Amino acid sequence: MKLCLIVASLCCFTIVRAQIRQVGAKDVSVQQYPFIAVISYARQLIGNGALIAPKWILTSASAVYSYPDSEYNVALGASDFYGSGKWYKVGQIFRHPEFVGWDYNIAMVLIRGKVQYTDTIQPIAIGTSFPETIEVTMLSYGQNEHNTTHLRGATYTLISDNTDCIRLLDEYMAKEMIWNRNGFCMIPPPGTIQGQWFNDAGAPMVAQGQLYAVFAFAEHEGGLNEGSVATRVASFHGWIQTIMSRKP
């Protein structure tokens, strides 16, 4: 993903839409991960998120950078973007006020309507610890190398050690996320080929039933095993609680 900063702290994205796929993952079911949410803009797949409370979806700000908020919809309980699921209109999106395209890459989505918990719709708890290294499963509906939009899972190791992580990154503002302890570098299993694309944005990264991160961006969209960063959710726990306290 190429990102550029412009006047008034707005961000613009140059998106290669001819190649939109999460590489190196495998199909999983929503029954395994009932917190997963798919996010659409004008009914086009643009990102993912995690249900963390009734009416609240946690995602990355890079997944919901477009306006107006009324053009967004969220689906819960679906194993495929085009499959069966419960669709909700979005009431409002709260993007972190310091997000300008790189750091502070987190957002909260308030959905309309009453969420009925079922076997395929359940919230997930936020991991509040600060591990330097943790193995996670990344979940995304992002279109893949088989040209499907089925929910897929891929294994990554998240690291936040400055020395090892910074070596993987080229851009100063990407490195800044790590220095500020707001992000992780994403390392695939040895010998695997994995990559991420723009509609993997907001993909939850979970371990032991808790949410530790959401996919933020890849410095080189589609580049395999290089320059990928996830937002560390625990760093924003206080902000998340503040946002949820504002609305029912």
Image: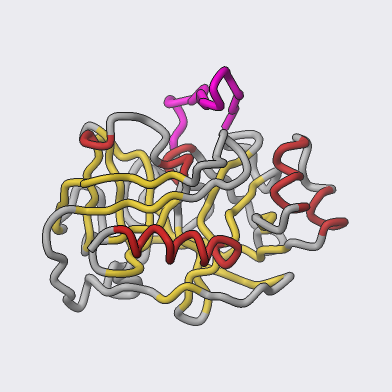
Number of numbered labels in the structure image: 0
Closest to the observer, 141 or 214? 214
Q: Position of residue 69 (x, y in %)?
A: 27, 36
Rendering quarter of residue 151: bottom left
Residue at 61 percent across and 39 percent down: it is: 102
- Whether the magenta-drawn stretch holds residue 7 is answered as yes
Question: Taking 80 as reference, is 203 left or right?
Answer: right
Q: Position of residue 25 (x, y in %)?
A: 48, 57
Residue at 22 percent across and 46 percent down: it is: 90
Q: For the view shown, which residue lies furthest in the right direction? A: 163
- Whether the magenta-drawn stretch holds residue 18 is answered as yes
Q: Quadrant of the N terminus?
A: top right
Question: Taking 33 as reference, is 193 left or right?
Answer: right
Rendering quarter of residue 123: bottom left
Residue at 43 percent across and 26 percent down: it is: 17
Question: Taking 64 as reference, is 118 left or right?
Answer: left
Q: For the view shown, which residue lies furthest in the bottom direction? A: 208
Residue at 36 percent across and 39 percent down: it is: 46
Q: Position of residue 133 (x, y in %)?
A: 71, 71
Q: Is residue 150 above or below residue 40?
A: below
Q: Position of residue 245 (x, y in %)?
A: 34, 64
Q: Is residue 41 above or below residue 78?
A: above
Magenta residues, as a range?
Answer: 1-20
